[in-house]
Amino acid sequence: MTIEVVGFGLAGACLAIQLTKLGAIVRVTDDGFLGSTAVAAGLVNPVTGKNFQPSWRLSDFWPEAQLFYQSLDESLYHPMPIFRRWMDDRDKFQKKYDTVAPWIAEVSEEGVTWKEGGWLETRRFLEVARAWLLEQGVSFEPGCSDSEVQVRCGGSAALRKREFAKIDHRCAKGEILTVTIPDWQEDYILTGGGWLIPIGNEKYRVGATYAWDGLDSGPTEEGREWVERILRNFTKRDYEICDHQAGVRPIIRKSQPVLHYEEELGWLFNGLGSKGVIYAPRVARQLAEHLLDGKAFDPDLRLSI
């Protein structure tokens, strides 16, 4: 079976790999647009949000995802503890203690440290994925009209084009800074009102904003100032900004992945939001197995319209 994967962000790359592993003839339509995957933090955080909410079905999806990334390149994913500082929310934490207990490494007067966290080098993942697919003979073409099946993995850009008009979405723009902080050797991720990830050589990624308007405006002065305020909440040290990027998160539900089919358009794989690193490999495998072998995929992934 020949399957066209439209889009080569996190969803498209994972799907193309899973299809290829199962023996499909895969063609990737990639317009070269660097979507949110290329600038994403790649953060894997087991407990998030102001209400200490465990990431949706983490124990189902993350073990498979971790093995998937390791099979491509063991250096892509960096396991790292996550320290969440208190923000007048310790009472909320106590109420959720039993729920989040599996991920607690330590509780202190300053905050709570989560285990099983880390981050994926998302941009390099796309480079590694492309190289692996090319080695397997997968073609990257402008369009594949003779494909038997088409799967659209266009992220936020596709959602905003309303390719699937019945699907409601709420995409959110995020801005991220990369900074250098001399002589500050943090060996864990910081969260609480934002996040800070050490990426090596005294460099850190800091974010992120959530903006619902001006999605196509790119990096902004307002966004930079917002992220700098986040950074100053984590450290008072001097820093130098090395890079400023913006991306748009594809959100359909509550940052939960979606599989959807319409006869005239084919398949949609989208909605990875800010936690796509956790979910993309397993969802991609299930869709690949459904397309090639007719296996039913997880009903939680199906979108009800």
Image: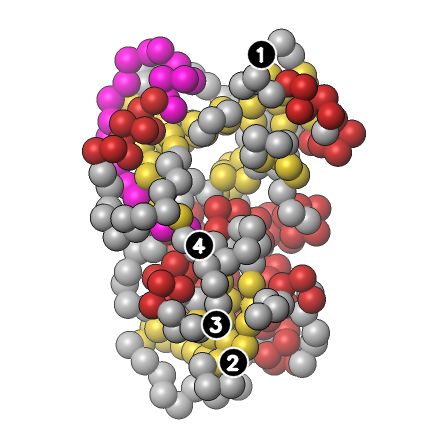
Q: Quadrant for residue 219, please give it.
A: top left
Left or right, 148 with respect to 59, comes to left
- Nearer the observer, 21 or 87: 87
- Nearer-N-terminus badge (2/3): 3
| Residue 128 drawn above or below residue 96 | below
Q: CA distance from mark 4 to mark 3?
A: 13 Å
Residue at the extreme right of the image, as rendered: 98
Quickly name the residue at label 3: 166
| Residue 82 drawn above or below residue 284 | above
Q: Which residues are magenta?
A: 230-249
Left or right, 141 with respect to 40, comes to left
Quickly name the residue at label 2: 262
- Nearer the observer, 41 or 272: 272
| Residue 19 drawn above or below residue 155 | below
Name the element at disc 2: strand
Q: Residue at x 57, y 30 (%)?
A: 50
Quickly name the residue at label 4: 170
Q: Residue at x 51, y 25 (%)?
A: 192
Of tags 2 and 1, the one toward the viewer is 2
Q: CA distance from mark 2 to mark 3?
A: 10 Å
- Nearer-N-terminus badge (2/1): 1
Q: CA distance from mark 3 to mark 1?
A: 46 Å
Crowd rating for badge 3 (residues with CA inside 10 Å; few <14, some 14–19, many 20+) = few
